[in-house]
Amino acid sequence: MISHKTEGLLNVAALFAISAVLLVAFADQIFGGELPCPLCLLQRAGFLLLAIGPVLTVARGPHPAHYGITVLAGLAGAGFAMRQVLLHIEPGDAGFGAPFLGLHFYTWAFIVFVVAIAASAAMMLLRDPAPAEARDPRDRAAWPAFGTLAVALIVLLAAANTLSTVLECGAETCPDDPVVYQLLNAPGS
């Protein structure tokens, strides 16, 4: 069994891992100059959805439903990523964007979503079944500062992704192969 304290700390670590994935994508976008395609934007949204379960655990304490939310979000994100993998699976297709450590971001995204689903399933199996009220309240004291920081980072990344998407797509449908931020290159700006 995983203790309540360890369960909370693992959820905080999951939030930092999701933040790291989103930060790497942003770094590539800003410093590498590669704007995310519509499927890339959906995958980023999938990572933000993936964070809902751990955010709820940090805010309210562990509950099996939080892992269920994470599994559902992971399935949606994996679906978005697999769609993009399948679009570029034909021999000779260079794929979208530059590879990162030998794989494209969408392939990495699929792997991370599958790992998140597996980790959530493991947590459901290994968690302490005792109700939160029966647990030692001092267990939560182990993660509030890091938990608050992790949640704040996710909220900041959600806002940054929203702003970036609005700048990239404007009020139009996002282009399949974006090369400019639509709102920053609009006539009269």
Image: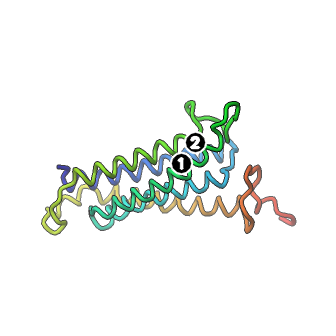
Question: Which kind of residue does numbered mark 2 sit on?
Answer: Phe
| Residue 138, quarter of the rendered image | bottom left
**Mark on residue 23?**
1
Using residue 110 as the reference point, say whether residue 7 is left or right of it. Answer: left
Q: Position of residue 88 (x, y in %)?
A: 65, 40
Picture colour scheme: rainbow
Which quadrant holds residue 38? bottom right
Task: Decide: few, some or many residues near mark 1? Use Cα within 10 Å; few <14, some 14-19, many ≥20.
Answer: few
- Indicate the position of residue 174 as horizontal and vertical percent values: 71, 59
Task: Indicate whether 163 appears above or below 28.
Answer: below
Q: In terms of secondary structure, where does tag 2 sit?
A: helix
**Amino acid type for the residue under numbered disc 1:** Leu
Instruction: Name which residue lies at 67% across and 51% down.
Output: 37
The number of numbered discs placed on residues in the rendered structure image is 2
Q: Residue at x 39, y 58 (%)?
A: 70
> In what quadrant of the picture does the C terminus appear?
bottom right
Q: Position of residue 28 (x, y in %)?
A: 62, 43
The label shown at residue 117 is none
Residue where numbered disc 2 is placed: 105
State whether residue 17 is above or below residue 141. Answer: above
- Say whether residue 188 is left or right of residue 183: right
Q: Secondary structure at mark 1?
A: helix
Is 110 displayed left or right of 63 in the figure? right
Q: Residue at x 70, y 35 (%)?
A: 93
As measured in the structure, the alpha-carbon distance from the residue carrying label 2 to the one carrying label 1 is 12 Å
Mark 2 is surrounded, within 10 Å at the Cα level, by few (under 14), some (14 to 19) or many (20 or more) other residues, namely many
Q: Looking at the image, which residue is at 74% across and 49% down?
A: 177
